[in-house]
Amino acid sequence: MHNACNEAIPNYNKSITTKSTGNPFGEKNISEASKITKEKHALWKNGGAPKDKNNPLKSQLTTAKRLLRKAHRQAYASQREKLANQIMTASSSDNKLFHKLLRTQRSDGNRFTKTLRRDNQMAETNEDILHMWTDYFYELSNPDYKQDFDYEKYELSTLQNTIIEKDRKGKAKIEPIREEEIHDAVKRLKTENPQISMEYQPNTTKTLRLSFYRSYCISSIQ
């Protein structure tokens, strides 16, 4: 049917084509600005990632990001201007452009994150959002240990993880503690602490049995 209409009507379903000059929608400017931003971000990160706005590395990175956002805005403006010109000069029989406009109006736009906020910072472009996530995970992997940091909890957690890791890798057989070892420990305890009376000896033996079993498990794994 379309072939018959094309043969019968010269201007049937004819779309307006425009010749593009240079990189479309300022892709060259975006590429150059993105490259500079990545270089400045690498220098800022290698320089200790300073947060002070007066720091030269931070200032240069902020300027590079600002220029990148400007390049993106100019590209989007050029794209909208081109589409507006196509609409103004389009033929009434241009069905392709008509359906393109319908899809644009009915679509919900970009499904990706458009804006990302962290503390007092705002990221609105893909490059800025990527850098913000990079900074976040960098700070997460390099914590700033302050004076109120719970070092005891940190050491216990590290020891626990080390024991679990060695246990999973080694799978060493843990021998149960012998009765003779418990009696020897009780004798040493009574010698070092003569105030322990005989009436508390059964409870002491049970406690020592559990303590020795735990300590033996840990020492065997290590």
Image (tube, rainbow, N blue to C red):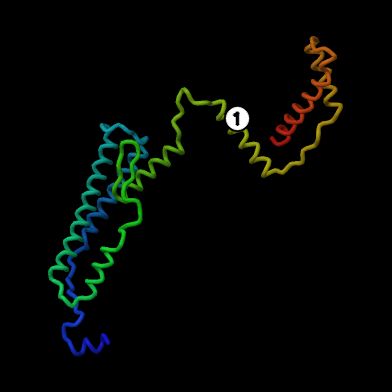
Q: In this view, does 191 lie above or below 5?
A: above
Number of disc labels: 1
Q: What residue type is labelled 1?
A: Leu
Instruction: Locate the N terminus by quadrant.
Output: bottom left
Residue at left offset 29%, top offset 51% = 35
Q: Label 1's element? A: helix
Q: Where does residue 66 sit, x and y in percent of width and height?
A: 23, 45
Q: Where does residue 81 sit, x and y in percent of width and height?
A: 16, 61
Quadrant of residue 8 within the rendered picture: bottom left
Q: Is residue 191 above or below residue 2?
A: above
Instruction: Locate the C terminus by quadrant.
Output: top right
Whether residue 185 sits left or right of residue 95 in the image: it is right
Label 1 sits on residue: 156
In the picture as drawn, the residue positioned furthest to the left comes out as 89
In the picture as drawn, the residue positioned furthest to the top comes out as 195
Quadrant of residue 29 within the rendered picture: bottom left
Q: Where does residue 112 sit, x and y in percent of width and height?
A: 35, 54
Query: Foreground residue, 221 or 98?
Result: 98
Mark 1 Cα shell of 10 Å, populated few (<14), some (14-19), many (≥20): few
Whether residue 182 sits left or right of residue 81 in the image: it is right
Q: Where does residue 128 sit, x and y in percent of width and height?
A: 31, 46
Residue at left offset 52%, top offset 26% = 150
Residue at left offset 70%, top offset 36% = 221
Residue at left offset 35%, top offset 43% = 132
Q: In this view, does 118 lie above or below 77?
A: above
